[in-house]
Image: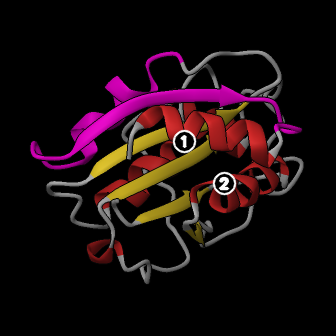
Amino acid sequence: MSKSLVTYFSASGVTAGLAKNLAEAAGAELYEIKPAVPYTNADLNWQDKNSRSSVEMNDKSLRPAIADTDANIADYDTIFVGFPIWWYVAPTIINTFLESYDFSRKTIILFATSGGSGMGNSAKELKPSVSDTAVIKDGKRFAASTSVSELKKWVDSLGI
């Protein structure tokens, strides 16, 4: 059985709760991807084209800084990467995280929370941020209220 790590970015706390349940379900360690500058409610106002999140998502070359790079990625075979869906894909801070570590020969499984959007092109947009030997799997979008037992079934179905 491979050693797993659940990493997550949560701007409002919703993805954090799901990540904690997933870590329990997978018997995995937990690591929070924290922005160097936390997001405010104004930053997250998707209806304001000048809000921080809107600006970041409209320019895919932007890489919001992360608070630290002390996740010990080398110790894990499988890394779950969780995030809220923004504009139908992963927020660009996930690219920052992936570009900050060596994911060579690692399996990355995406998971997300959303009010209704699916995973979109998240895997495709994140793939250039990791080495060619890393495998990124689309994963799944979950409701914030998804139970540990439901997540355990999903993890078991992955065969990791």
Residues packed near mark 1 inside 10 Å, few (<14), some (14 to 19) or many (20 plus): some
Asked if labels 1 and 2 touch by Cβ distance under 8 angstroms, the answer is yes
Asked if residue 81 shows in the view, the reply is yes
Residue 85 pos. (x, y %) = 65, 30
The residue sitting at 73% across, 61% down in the picture is: 20
Which residue occupies the foreground of this view, 123 or 37? Answer: 123
The residue sitting at 65% across, 44% down in the picture is: 152
Q: Which residue is mark 1?
A: 155
The magenta segment:
120-146
Which residue occupies the foreground of this view, 50 or 112? Answer: 112
Quadrant assignment for the N terminus = bottom left
Judged from the image, the secondary structure of the residue bearing numbered disc 2 is helix
Question: Which amino acid, by three-letter code, is at mark 2?
Answer: Ala
Q: Which residue is mark 2?
A: 25
Instruction: Based on the picture, tell me whether residue 128 belongs to the magenta stretch.
Output: yes
Separation of disc 2 and disc 1 at Cα? Answer: 7 Å
The residue sitting at 56% across, 32% down in the picture is: 57
